[in-house]
Image (tube, rainbow, N blue to C red):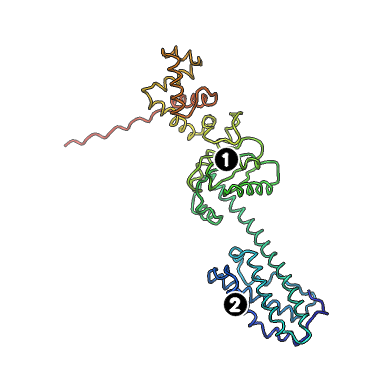
Amino acid sequence: MISKRTRASAATRRRVERAAGDLGAAAVQQMESRHEWYRSLPAEERSWVGLVAQAGIRSFIDWFTGSQEGAHVTADVFGTAPRELTRSISLAQTLDLVRTVVDVVERSTSDLAARGDEDKMREAVLRYSREIAFSAAHVYAQAAEARGAWDARLEALVVDAVIRGEADESMQSRASALGWGTTTDVCVIAGTTPDSPQDRVVDTLRRGAKRHDVELLIAIHGRRLVCIAGGVSDPLATATDLAAAFGEGPIVVGPVVPHLYAAGRSARAALSGHAAAPAWPAAPRPVLSDDLLAERALLGDLPARAALVSRIHAPLSASGGSNLLETAAAYLDGGQGLEGTARTLFVHPNTVRYRLARIADVTGYDLTDPHDAQTVRLALAFARVTPERPERPRPAAPDH
């Protein structure tokens, strides 16, 4: 607010009021010539910015020529533009707009002010520019707060849809609104929610993701914390970078999928692994869901059972010429070690040793490692109890 002693004369106020149209046009012209970002805006958004500039001139004149008793500059000058404009131009660009408007008015001071009013008008311009800058910051703060709350709701809906496997049109539109329409290389990370305020947990995760150039969607479901990471090159490394933001307990990383709309598979694996992880107390933190296939299968995870059979039993069966399946079964079921297995199979211990190495090459599991041995044992057991699909009889040829 300007004090009465700095109030300009009636002649100055009339001159300023008559110059409103010229000052607004000059402000828009200055925006066009001075700022590249303004010239690059689409025509519709450029027109909205021009209206804001003219509204700023009009607001100053109304304030300057009014009684100024208890009058404060508010954010009303930005009411001419839609809320979406705060997404199109940044706060810094808005301040460029304010500076341009102020410069136009200030350069016109000598022409507009009556004799003796020049200093009073300059002081009024400076005070108005300060107030309008604060108003701009207030508008952007409110927009950011509202956008943050809305984005958080959208984010929770998208994560919930991924967990439920509902990659429908509504989920896709919400994901696009969050900037995930083209995000690739996606995986889901499941862990325990720490005993910290949710805002702090989310902020910590976002800072960690930003440091490693990873996109992140976050949802807190009670004691379970679920993150969807995008743009992932090494899922285990990404989870390791974010691990400090999770609570105590296992952190399980689902497989990488091409895009968000296929992330339901990664989410199911991660959540199943998180539920089964306590069965492997020595599991690393974080751990891949594929490393918990045996534990997941014990909980009735049918895709995990199928994966065990296809990744372990099937390749061992296909390598029948080297008797790898027979050797694996004898080594695991007999519990007699290298020498005992050799006696059971009537072969030299070096043959068993060679076959164990081949089993590790073919399946990726080392039978001398306790956890790997348990995984292979369960794979063989599930293969034995899984009925083979009977071949459908071919229809008889028609009689002629």
- Residue 276 in picture, x, y percent from top left: 57, 32
Which of 36/68 is in front? 36
- Residue 202 in picture, x, y percent from top left: 65, 48
Disc on res. 216: none
Q: Are marks 1 and 2 in contact (CB under 8 Å)?
A: no
User: From the viewer's perspective, is 397 left or right of 126?
Assistant: left
Q: Quadrant of residue 345?
A: top left
User: From the viewer's perspective, is 58 left or right of 127?
Assistant: left
- Residue 145 in picture, x, y percent from top left: 66, 58
Tell me the element at label 1. Answer: helix
Q: Quadrant of the C terminus?
A: top left
Q: Is residue 378 above or below residue 396?
A: above
Residue for badge 1: 237
Q: Quadrant of residue 81?
A: bottom right
Q: Give the spatial CA distance, label 1 vs label 2.
A: 52 Å
Tell me the element at label 2. Answer: helix
Q: Residues within 10 Å of mark 1 (few under 14, many from 20)?
A: few
- Residue 101 in picture, x, y percent from top left: 66, 75
Q: Residues within 10 Å of mark 2 (few under 14, many from 20)?
A: few
- Residue pictured at 68% horizontal, 47% vertical: 198
- Residue pictured at 50% horizontal, 46% vertical: 185
Which of 108/47 is in front? 108
User: From the viewer's perspective, is 204 left or right of 391?
Assistant: right
- Residue pictured at 71% horizontal, 79% vertical: 62
Which of 194/120 is in front? 120
Q: Amino acid at mark 1?
A: Ala
Q: Quadrant of the N terminus?
A: bottom right
Residue for badge 2: 29
User: From the viewer's perspective, is 252 left or right of 70?
Assistant: left
